Amino acid sequence: MKYLLPWSLTLPVLLGLPAAIAATAETQQHLESLRQQDMDAEVRSGGQAEVTRLQQHKQDALSFPLMEEMAADARRRQFEAGEAANQSKTHGAARKEPGTAAERDAARFGRAVKIYQASGGTPPQQDLVQMTLTRHATGVARLIGWNELKAKKFESAIYWFGQAAAWSPADDDARYGLALAQYQAGNVTAALTLLQGNDSPAARELRGNILFSQGMAEYETGNFQVAAKLWPQAVESGRNGRDVQLMRAWTDLKLGDDASALQRFASLYQAHPDAEVAQGLYQAALASGKQEQLPSWMSANPDDPLRRLAQSRHNEFLKQQGWVWAAHSNSPGSTPELAGIQGPWLDVAAALRSKTGDSGQSRLRIDMQPAMEGLFASGNEVLQLRLTRLRLDSGALPTDARFGSYNALGRYVAQPTTQSSGWVPSLSWRHEGDGSAYQFSLGTTPTAAPVGLTPTFEAMTERLGEQGAWRAAAYRSSVRDSVLATVGAVDPYSGQSWGRVVRNGLRADAYQMVGAPWSVNGNIRAEHIDGKDVAANARVAGGVGLGYELGGKDFTYFSVGPGIDYDHYTDNLSHFTWGHGGYFSPQSFLNVGLAARFLTLEGGPWVARGQVSAGLQHVTEDAAACFPLAPAIAQPDCGTYASSSKQGVGGSIEGLWRYAVTQHWQLGGALSLRYSQNYSDASVLLTLRYSWDARHGLYRADLPEGMFGDLF
């Protein structure tokens, strides 16, 4: 009788790898002899201990048919033993011990198996194996090996599979079992060596699994070059499923082969779109600069994984760049942290600025109180209205100061303007889209000015990309370097008024990543500057800087880097006689230094932004006529202003913050300290805001930048 061992029933626990292991006919003969011998022994002993032991062993190896059959045979033998015992008593008959060589070998083999079972699976000594497990026991050795492997006794399994493979070198099943045991024991190289030349489906599958596992280990430890070499080997061994192709795509992306990664992810997504492949496809498209192709892989289904991921990532990107209104408007449900961001609010503030200089002329103190600002938003549109009251004071003007149509022998016919108080209105509209924004502001210079007010405006456009941003603006703005420049002044010698300088200009700013963690930023501007009875002037300025991102878990960004700034005015009109504008206008201003910029994490109960800079400055100012508009006013004894050249250290500290006291009330503030070779300047602002809608987090858009800017 032959016994077939159906391994498909015994090995699902071993990684689901089927193996066909059949006991040889010769082995079965030994087993038959073993059963006969056991039955004789059970006649003498009653067999109960054997039944108990085999039942226990059955519990340890229920999936092995041979063991089950042995247990069944033991039960049958127990019954037959009772009958044989009765017959023995009646007839006095006794069975003889095996006498042939085959029977003796079978008996020795049976005793070896019993020793193996009784020892808990510990392999017999080498001499016992040589004595009992002959060339006829290959199938049973494999059986024991599988049983040990199931019990995770890897060294014992290696021993028994090794015996089977040694007795039958051509037995692919034994070599396969040995390779699997070596792999489970962590001996990967030995396992792959054993699988060489074994082209059975199970061996190929195991070889592919091992290579794939090695590739995953290398990938997870960052050895992407090694992992890239293992994936094709796994494919050649038959492991060519979706998981391998997905890992090949991720490895290409890690190695910078963005085009290959994009192609692999796209093929996988077309075959079966899911969230994991969508993530890889999205990242590969960004890395290769082909994000515009993303819509071509999206289906019309609004729940398409790539569509949902792209929208979510884009909203998150907009939020990280400070475009919170666009992020919320695009998909309100996906940004619950922005709830309340579009609700109206009202801000009230007070501020103070103090700038050093000559009393009555370049010295300046600005008190801003009150200042009020309100916001109304709907969708992508934001409307802001601001009204501030400025009180300007330059101190007392000395009697001998050169001011207005100065004449050393002249007398005052009017009180010189060294103070002023007026309102500054401003209305701004902003539209934020997915990657573009437009803004327009309209206002005036301060009211109650000696020369009257004039309109101001700014028209700006912004573009935002994954690797950078730029903006351009045309503007007309007030110059707030002195009372004369801000609102104008009355000439004490003639009673006429002049001043109130405005800048009419174009400005461009850009920011670009040049390879993490480095970035570059730059700006350039060109202006035409004039005022009432103030000589026209022109300005060109620009700067460039590098930034190294330091990171930090509490910061949206924290960068430090060198920079250089240059400023040039055609004429020096910084003085306070007729035709001058009373504003800083050097012919050369060069600053080379270092700057650190930061923005704390947004979305929490507080947010702050600031910068600290220091550098070497070189400032030159040309000599200037006392009256640049000489044909209009000429005084023979005014003289000229001498040229100057200064160099030294300059720097600045600036910061803005906002803190949520409750979900409706927030405190805010700003601080600025500046020092240069020509003057020093300090400013501070405090605000209180009420939001009609409950706020769950603060962002850079909440910083009091607009009101603080009215001081400068």
Image (cartoon, rainbow, N blue to C red):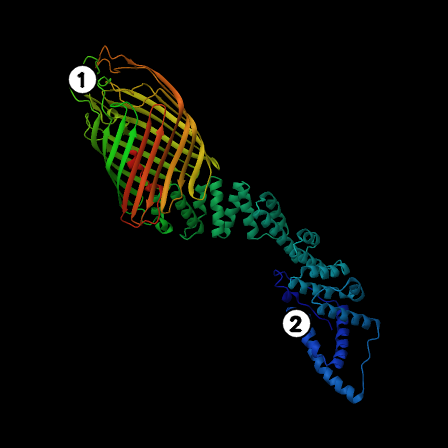
Which tag, 1 or 2, sits closer to the chain's start?
Answer: 2
Quarter location, residue 58: bottom right
Up-down relation of residue 516 to residue 18 (above or below): above
Q: Is residue 245 left or right of residue 464?
A: right
Q: Is residue 251 left or right of residue 480?
A: right
**Residue 672 picture location, percent across and down:** 34, 33
Q: Is residue 258 left or right of residue 577?
A: right
Q: Could you tell me which quadrant the N terminus lies in?
A: bottom right
Q: Is residue 508 visible?
A: yes
Mark 1: amino acid: Tyr
**Residue 153 picture location, percent across and down:** 67, 62
Mark 2: amino acid: Lys
Q: Which residue is mark 2?
A: 58
Up-down relation of residue 132 to residue 557 (above or below): below
Q: Which residue is mark 1?
A: 493
The residue under the point 36% across, 39% down is 436
Q: Is residue 255 left or right of residue 465?
A: right
Q: Secondary structure at mark 1?
A: loop
The residue under the point 43% across, 28% down is 593
Image label count: 2
